[in-house]
Amino acid sequence: MRDHEPLIDELLGRFRQELGTDFEKYANHVHRVFETCVMRDTDPANRHKYAIAAVFHDIGIWTAHTIDYLPPSIDQAEHYLNTMQGGAGVAEITAMIYWHHKIRPYHGAFPVTVETFRKADWTDVSLGLLTFGADPRMLRSLRRKFPNAGFHWFLIRKIGANFLRHPLNPLPMFKS
């Protein structure tokens, strides 16, 4: 486990103003998800993809001010990938973002990276109740290195407010 992934720090820095006081809580979530991905998938070719997907996967909460954040998060990732990488990786990284809240295992294009990313996010969002076989000691170490900083309370407040506004669709980001 490195101290910090430089690409994550660079990309998160671009959203410092939008994230405001939530910067640390989101940055730590991003780092925990990323580190869980590279703990599971040691293919060095996927490291860069996980870093980008981790930064952009929930960013629409802040950039579009919505709990229905998958489309604006994907838009931000596509913009970055098209502008900075000539479109390389768009299909794979946007699939990682789109399916990261899928409840059942993912079967489709890019199965290794999408499923690895899905499991890593679920592991973090569930506070380690769902580990999908990840080493609990490593997960505790990640949580010490990148503390929660109120991320889960932030999510609960956002989801609760959305439930009051949209009781028939309180969790628009979940996929079956």
Image: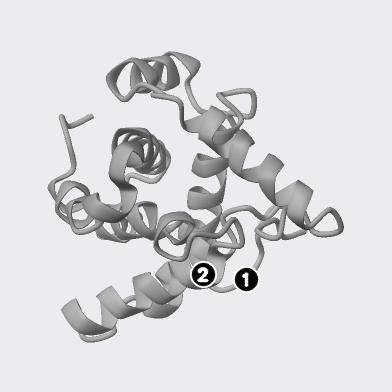
- Position of residue 113 relative to residue 26, above or below, is below
Q: Position of residue 9 (x, y in %)?
A: 17, 47
Q: Are marks 1 and 2 in contact (CB under 8 Å)?
A: yes
Query: Which comes before the other along the chain, label 1 or label 2?
Result: 2
Q: Secondary structure at mark 2?
A: helix
Q: Residue furthest right?
A: 168
Q: In the picture shown, does residue 12 fall above or below 138?
A: below
Callout 1: helix, strand or loop? loop
In the image, taking residue 125 as reference, residue 2 lies left or right, namely left
The label on residue 108 is 1
Examine the rendered structure and indicate whether residue 128 appears above or below residue 48: above
Q: Which dot marks residue 95?
A: 2
Instruction: Identify the residue at horizontal 54%, vertical 30% (top origin).
Output: 152
Q: Quadrant of the N terminus?
A: top left
- Few, some or many residues within 10 Å of mark 2 (<14, 14–19, 20+): many
Vertical relation: 133 (above or below) 70 = above
Observer able to see residue 88:
no
User: Can you give x and y, in whole percent of width and height, for residue 73 in the image?
Assistant: 45, 66
- Name which residue type carries label 1: Gly
Left or right: residue 136 versus residue 87 is right
Left or right, 135 with reference to 104: left
| Amino acid on which the number 2 mark rests in the picture | Ala
Q: Nearer the viewer, mark 1 or mark 2?
A: 2
Quarter of the figure with residue 49:
bottom left
Q: Position of residue 82 (x, y in %)?
A: 27, 84
**Cα distance between the residues tagged 1 and 2:** 9 Å
